[in-house]
């Protein structure tokens, strides 16, 4: 009777349902216990597949169920102009879910090459999930380890980054399938150790905040009207009012693409911005043009509107901010529609960089999507004093996307041992300390400003020093154990 549930439409529904259940550990639900239970059942199921073909389809359907729920926010950009693009939404969620599910399917097939398939699935899955964050510019969203963000277990990211969290998650789920009650006891020990380490680390004191006041401005401009010429002045006025209200701060920060004007064509706007801040610096998301190229930029203005620092977004969103191979299509065939060099999409900046803001210290700017890439953050040659993410989360809707995006940004703070200041147009504007804890936060979906300071930074973490090296050694050790024919799973 059990075997009948493993094949046909029942088995397909079971696999997809387990995948969707595993996604419940992601924000905003945070049900990590559901994730562990679903993964344990999935490993048990995969260990009983009759052949590689059945394992492939089980892994594919489980992955599709997982990503369909976890990434359900992907429909939101298409619903901003429903009449024009709404029809694309179902294709987007189905295409993305099954595309990413191929990594799960590949892990399920590779696991069958191991004498110990259950442990082989753990090794293959973690390695392929890491690869998902790299290939085709990478998309490390909704990693399994993200279910621990906001719990003490997330502190393990300071040791091994997000992949270590995924390894702990899947290993704890798989051990009962490997060794039954002994495996369940091993899972309990792993989780107890993870929680214990996290609680110990969270109990360690942090340095005092940096001197100087910050004002984080959240204008709450709705995406459907953000670029309407008739409302451009209204949105700028919101920013100026919140900047000047009750006297300006030492440093004011505006979100991504906050200014609805191009300074190249409206240079007087720069002076309006610094007039509101009393000449004090304002770090603002302002698009810029250079030649025929456009950039999504963070620009620091002060004095009488003078630009003193700038960062151009380097890791752009494929199909959202640029079209892959668009410049080649222009160079080879003269097609301008998708070419950044012809001003029709954004061009990428030279790469991650640290800005020296004088009395405010050295800051690593991250624009929106860039905060989901741990290895990009780790690649900066100079260690900053803090990180700054400016973003426009109106693209992600109001249900799941903004909260998942914020959670991943919090993980960067843990990995680096650095505080994070996050400023959103609409979304989550918050201050995060070097342990990844939310210190202050503005209410979601409101027009408001938050006066604060930059929390203190910790010394470099093991992850910031060594990256994925130790994790690779750990996976190599598990690989050796999984290939040991004398350690087969107990059924």
Image: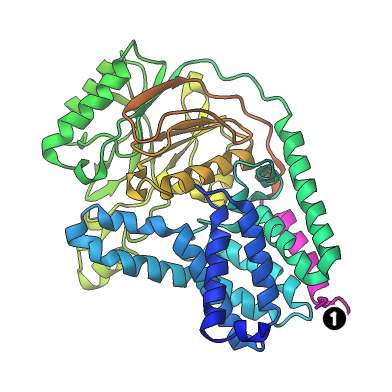
Expressed as whole percent of the image width and height from the top left, the position of residue 349 reads 39, 47
Q: Is residue 42 left or right of residue 267?
A: right
Q: Residues within 10 Å of mark 1 (few under 14, many from 20)?
A: few
Q: In this orientation, which residue lies closer to the viewer: 353 or 35?
A: 35
Establish if 177 lies above or below 217. Answer: below
Indicate whether residue 476 is drawn in magenta: yes
**Residue at coordinates 22% horizontally, 29% vertically from top-left?**
236
Above or below: residue 491 compared with residue 200: below
User: Where does label 1 land, which residue?
Assistant: 485
Q: Point out the residue furthest to the front here.
A: 1
Q: Quadrant of the C terminus?
A: bottom right
What residue lies at 57% left-to-right and 65% top-to-bottom? 131
What is the magenta range? 467-491
Q: Left or right: where does residue 246 sit relative to residue 85?
A: right
Q: Position of residue 379 (x, y in %)?
A: 57, 47
Q: Is residue 338 visible?
A: no
Q: 241 or 324: which is nearer to us?
A: 241
Is residue 29 highlighted in magenta?
Answer: no
Q: Residue 257, can we see it?
A: yes
Quadrant where the N terminus sits is bottom right
Q: Give me the residue at 67% from left, 88% from top.
A: 50
Q: Position of residue 51 (x, y in %)?
A: 65, 89
- Would you say 484 lies left or right of 34 here? right
Secondary structure beneath label 1: loop
Q: How is the image coloured?
A: rainbow
Residue drawn at (70%, 73%) of the image: 44
């Amino acid at each position: 009777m059990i075997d009948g549930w493993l094949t046909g439409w029942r088995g397909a529904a079971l696999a997809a349902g387990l995948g969707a259940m595993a996604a419940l550990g992601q924000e905003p639900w945070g049900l990590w216990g559901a994730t562990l239970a679903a993964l344990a059942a999935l490993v048990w199921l995969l260990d009983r597949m009759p052949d590689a073909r059945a394992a492939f389809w089980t892994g594919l359907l489980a992955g599709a169920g997982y990503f369909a729920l976890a990434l359900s926010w992907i429909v939101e950009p298409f619903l901003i102009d429903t009449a024009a693009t709404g029809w694309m939404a179902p294709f987007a969620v189905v295409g993305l879910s099954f595309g990413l599910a191929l990594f799960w399917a590949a892990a399920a097939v590779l696991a069958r090459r191991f004498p110990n398939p259950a442990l082989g699935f753990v090794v293959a899955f973690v390695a392929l999930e890491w690869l998902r964050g790299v290939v085709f510019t990478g998309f490390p969203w909704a990693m399994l380890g993200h279910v621990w963000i906001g719990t003490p277990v997330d502190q393990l990211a300071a040791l091994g980054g997000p992949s270590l969290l995924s390894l702990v998650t899947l290993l704890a789920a798989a051990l009962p399938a490997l060794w039954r009650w002994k495996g369940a006891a091993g899972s309990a020990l792993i989780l107890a150790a993870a929680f214990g380490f996290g609680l110990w680390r969270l109990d360690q004191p942090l340095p005092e905040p940096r001197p100087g006041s910050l004002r984080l401005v959240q204008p709450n401009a709705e995406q459907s009207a953000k670029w309407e010429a008739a409302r451009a002045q209204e949105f700028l006025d919101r920013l100026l009012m919140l900047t000047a209200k009750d006297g300006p701060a030492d440093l004011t920060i505006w979100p991504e693409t906050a200014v609805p004007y191009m300074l190249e064509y409206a240079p007087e706007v720069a002076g309006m911005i610094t007039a509101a801040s009393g000449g004090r610096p304002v770090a603002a998301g302002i698009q810029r043009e250079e030649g025929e190229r456009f950039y999504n930029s963070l620009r620091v203005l002060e004095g009488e509107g003078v630009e003193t620092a700038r960062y151009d977004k380097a890791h752009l969103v494929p199909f959202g901010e640029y079209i892959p191979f668009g410049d080649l299509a222009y160079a080879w065939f003269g097609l301008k529609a998708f070419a950044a060099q012809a001003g029709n999409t954004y061009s990428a900046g030279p790469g991650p960089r640290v800005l020296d803001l004088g009395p405010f210290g050295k800051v690593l700017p991250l624009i929106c999507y860039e905060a989901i890439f741990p290895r990009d953050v780790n690649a900066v040659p100079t260690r900053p004093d803090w990180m700054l993410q400016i973003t426009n989360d109106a693209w992600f809707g109001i249900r799941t996307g903004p909260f998942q995006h914020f959670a991943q940004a919090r993980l960067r703070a843990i990995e680096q041992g650095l505080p994070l200041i996050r400023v959103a147009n609409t979304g989550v504007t918050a201050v995060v300390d070097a342990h990844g804890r939310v210190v202050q936060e503005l209410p979601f979906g409101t027009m408001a400003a938050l006066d604060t300071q930059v929390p203190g930074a910790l010394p470099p973490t093991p992850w910031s020093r060594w990256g994925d090296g130790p994790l690779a050694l750990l996976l190599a050790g598990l690989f050796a154990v999984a290939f040991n024919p004398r350690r087969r799973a107990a059924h």
